[in-house]
Amino acid sequence: MMTLDMATSASCGPAGEAVAQTVEVILEIVLAANDVLVKKECFKELATYLERIIPILKELNRKNVSDSESLNNAIEILNREIRAAKQLTLECSKRNKVYLLMNCRTIVKRLEDTVKEISRALDLIPLASLDLTSGISEEIGELCDKMQRAEFRAAMAEEEILEKIESGIQERNVDRSYANNLLVLIAEAVGIPTERSALKKEFEEFKNEIESTRLRKDEAEAIQMDQIMALLERADATSSPREKEIKHFSKRKSLGSQPLEPLQSFYCPITRDVMEDPVETSSGQTFERRAIEKWFADGNKLCPLTMTSLNTSILRPNKTLRQSIEEWKDRNTMITIGSIKPKLNSEEEEEVLQSLEQLQELCEQRDLHREWVILEDYVPTLIQLLAKNREIRNRALLILCILAKDSDDAKERIVKADNAIESIVRSLGRRVGERKLAVELLLELSKCHLARDCIGNVQGCILLLVTMSSSDDSQAARDAQALLENLSFSDLNIIQMAKANYFRHLLQRLSTGPEDVKLTMATTLAEMELTDHNKESLFEGGVLGPLLHFVSHGDTHMKNVAAKALRNLSSLPKNGLQMIKEAAVRPLLDSLFNHSTSSSSLREHAAGTIMHLAVSTVSQESSQIPVSLLESDEDILMLFSLINLTGPEIQQSIIQTFQALCQSPSAPIIKTKLSQCAAVQVLVQLCEHDDLCVRANAVKLFCCLSEGGDEVTLVEHVNQKCIETLLKIIKSSKDEEEIASVMGIVSNLPELTQITQWLLDAGALPIIFSHLHNGKQNNPYKNQLIENAVGAICRFVVPTNLEWQKSAAGTGIIPLLVQLLESGTTLTKKRAAISLCRFSESSLVLSRLIPKRKGFLCFSAPPETVCPVHGGICSIESSFCLIEADAVRPLVRILGEHDPGACEASLDALLTLIEGERLQSGSKVLGEANAIPPIIKFLGSPSPSLQEKAIHALERIFRLVDFKMKYGALAQMPLVDLTQRGSGSVKSLAARILAHLNVLHDQSSYF
C-alpha cells in the first residue's frame, strides 16, 4: 500500500492540495475497512476500488496538470464523495452490531450509491483536463466502468434474518421460541457469543442506538426499530426473569380479576363464533375466512348481511379487528391462568385433575401462555403434585415437560424447587407411561448446567437411567441414553454409570481424556467388583488397548493402576485368551522381571494377571488353535526362578501360573522345562514354607509334576523328612485341596520299598484310611481326595510284601475298597480294583487249610465254610479273599463301564480267581456272577491290552466243556473277526479257541 508521504508529494496549487487530501481520506478508508462490523467483503471491495484511484491521482500531480476551474470542481466532487464513503465506513465500525445488521440493506444501498457517485466524479476528471495522457484516461474509463457495474447485496443469512423479522412484525408473532431462535441467528450473523449475558449486553446497546435514532428525529427509522425491539424483547436473553415478572404482574393487576365478554364485532355473522382469521369482503363486511370461503364455494355471490353482490376474489385480512380479538383473548387467558393455581391445592382430586387439564390445554396453545404460567410461579405447585396419585403425577409431569422445553427460566425454576429433581427421579421407577414422561423431562432439564449438576447426585437416578437405556420402549431408551450422554460431563457420574454396568463413557474417557481423568477411570476399573458379563463387555468395548499402553508407557502410579485393572479383568478366561493373542504377556513379564524400575505392587499385579492368563489357557476349546502363554524357554526359566526371589504374594501367583500351565495344552513342554530347573527341589523346600497359601500352592504344583514325572528326579529329592512333612500337612491342614494334593503326591511317588517303608514308619496308613472313611460329604475336593487316597493305598498292597498287605488289611480297607467299586469315580474304581487285584494275588497262599476233625462227630464244632475258589478257610483280613469281601459282582459290574482302564483293572482282579489249578472253581464263580459275556465283549475292544487279556482268559475258560457249550456261540463271531483283523499272537490264540469250539480243525496251521 502507498504511504501517505508518497501520495502527497504533490505540486502546489488548489488541485494539488485537493488531490493530497483525497489520497489521505482514501488511505483512512482502506484502514477503517478492516474494522467494519458488517459487510466486510463489501467494504474491502470499496477499498480495492479506492486504492486503484491513488495511482491516478499521483499521476495527476506528477504531470503537473494545470489548474482549471473545471478540474478543481471535478476533484472537489470526488473528494466529497470519498468523504461520504469514509463517513459510512466509520459508522459501520463504531455502531452496535445488531443495529447495523438491521440496517444492512440500507448500508448496502448507500455503499452501492457511494461507489457509483465516486465513479461519476472520477469520470469528470478527463473531461476537465486535456493534459491527461491517453493511458490515464483509459485507466480512469476502465475503473469507472467497473465501479458503475458494481453490485452490493446483503448476504443470504442477513436476508433470511430480515425476512424473519418482517414476517414476525407482520404476523405479530410474539412466540418466545421464535424470538429466541431469531436472536441466536442474529448473534451468529454478527459474530457475538450466544451466551445469555453477551446477548443481553448487545441488546442493551441496540436499545441505546434506538434512543440515538430518536434524538436524531428519524421517526421512520425509530418506528421500525421499535417494532424490531418489541419482537426481540420476547427472547429470554433480552430481560431477566425478574424484569419479566415485574412487567407481567404489573399488566395483570391492571386487567382486573374477571374475564370480559367478547364484543359483538368479534363474532362472525355466519358462524356466530368469535373469529380467528377475520377478513373483509368487497361490501365492507367482516367474516371468518373459512366461513365466507365456504359461502362462496356453495355458489353464493351475495353478501350474507347486505345481500349486495360481492367480488368473490377480494378478501382482505382485517388486521385491526384480529389484533383486538387477540388482545381480548390474551387478557382473559392471563386472568384465567392466574385463577387456576389455587384450585390445584384442592383436596378434591377430581378438581385438581380438571384444573391440570385446563392448564395443559392453555400451555399447548401458545408459547406466551407457557411464559405466563412460569411467571405465575406454578412450578413449585406442580412439583408438589408429584406426591399425589398416578393420574395427577402424569399430568403434572406432562405440563412440566411443556414448560421446560426451550425455556431456561423454567428449567432453573424447576431445579430450584424443593425436592424437584428427587421427585422426578422417583417417577423413573414407576409405571411405563410415568417413567417415559420423567425421563423426557429430565432430558430437557439436563440442557441446563444447574440441572445437570443435580440430576446425577440423586440416589439411584443413574442406575434407573441405565436400566431404561436398554428397555423395549425405543423412545424412552433413546431419551435415557441421551440423558446419560448429557450427564457424562462429570467424572463422578461416569463412575456411577460404570457401577451400573454402563461403560461407554468410561471407555471414552479412558482412551481420549486428560491424563488425570484417564487415571481416575483406570482406578475405577481396578477397584470395581465386576461380573463376568461386565468384564466381557469392557473387552468388547476396547478397554485392553489403553490399559496395555498405560502399563508400558505410563508413569509409576498409572502403571500400577492399569496393571491392577488388567488383573481384575483378566480373571475371565475369555479375556485372558484375548490378552495373550493381543501380546499382553510381554509388557506384564517385563514389569515382573524388572526389579529396579517396577514397584512391588506393580509386580504383584503383573504376577496376578499372568496367573489369570495361565488359567485361561486351561479352558481352551479343542476346536481352537492352542494359545501358549510362555513362548520361550528363557521366559519359563526366568519366571520360575522368581519364586525364590520374591515375597509370598508373587510366589503364590507364579506357582499358580505353573500349576495352571501343567493342565494346559502346553503341559508336556512346561513339565519338561520345570524338571530342567530343579522345580521339584524348590517345591519340596516350599512344603515347609511358613505362609500357608504359598505352601498349599507349592503342594498342588508338586502334585501336578509328580503325576507321570521323572522317577529319578522324585527319588533324588523326596527323602524321609519330605515324607514326614507331607503327612504332617495332611494331619494339620484346613485346606481340603491341599490335602487332596498331598494324597496325590503320595500316590504318584515311585513304588520303591524305601519310600513305602518311610510312609509306613510315619503312620501313613491310618491317616489315609481315616480320610477315606471319614471324608467330609460337602468337600468340593472329595472325589480328588478319594481318588488320590485309593491310589496311595495301592503302594501298600503289593503282593511281594505280605506284611504290608496285612497292615493295610488290618485297617479295614478291603470292605471300603469294595464299597468304592460301587460309589467311586471311574478313576477311584480303577485304583480300588488294582488294590483288590493285588490283595487277591496273595489269597491262595494265605487261605487256611481245613483242620482235620477229631473225636466224635456229634460233639465236634460245626465245620467252617470252605472257600469255593481257594479251597481253604478264607476271610477278608486274613486271606483278602474277593469272595468273602463280596467284591466279585461289583467288579463284574465295572466290566460294563466305558472306561477301558477301569475295565482292565477289574478284569485283572477277577482273573486272579482262575489262575493255575483254580480254573474250574474260579470259572464257576465268574459264571455265577455273569462275568463271561462282558469278557467276550472285550474281544472287540479298541484297547489292545484289554483285548489280549480277554482272549487269554477265554482260551483257558473254554477248556471247560460246560463253559464252551454255554458261551461258545456268543464268542464265535468276535473270535472269527480277530482271526481276520487281530495281531499275530491274537490271531493264533483266536484260532486255537475256535478249534476248541470245533469251528476250526485242531491241526490247522493257517493262523
Image (cartoon, rainbow, N blue to C red):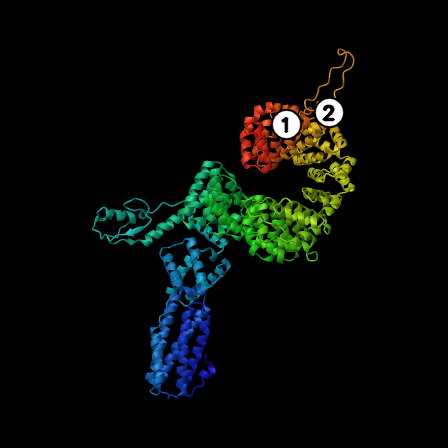
In-front residue for pair 20/335: 20
Quickly name the residue at label 2.
847
Q: Name the kind of residue labelled 2 in the image.
A: Ser
Element class at badge 1: helix
In-front residue for pair 965/202: 965
Q: Residue at x 38, y 57 (%)?
A: 168
Label 2 close to label 1 by CB (< 8 Å): no
Quickly name the residue at label 1.
890
Tell me the crowding category of disc 2: few under 14, some 14 to 19, or many 20 or more residues within 10 angstroms, Cα based: many
Q: Do we see residue 620 in this rendering?
A: yes
Residue 347 position, x and y percent, is 49, 36
Q: Name the kind of residue labelled 1 in the image.
A: Pro
Q: Which of marks 2 and 1 is nearer the N terminus?
A: 2
Residue 490 against residue 98 in the figure, above or below: above
Check the picture and name the quadrant holding the C terminus. top right
Residue 609 against residue 750 in the figure, above or below: below
Image quadrant in which you'd find residue 810: top right
Left or right, 989 with respect to 677, comes to left
Labels 2, 1: front one: 2
Element class at badge 2: loop
Left or right, 453 with respect to 802, comes to left
Residue 115 position, x and y percent, is 37, 74
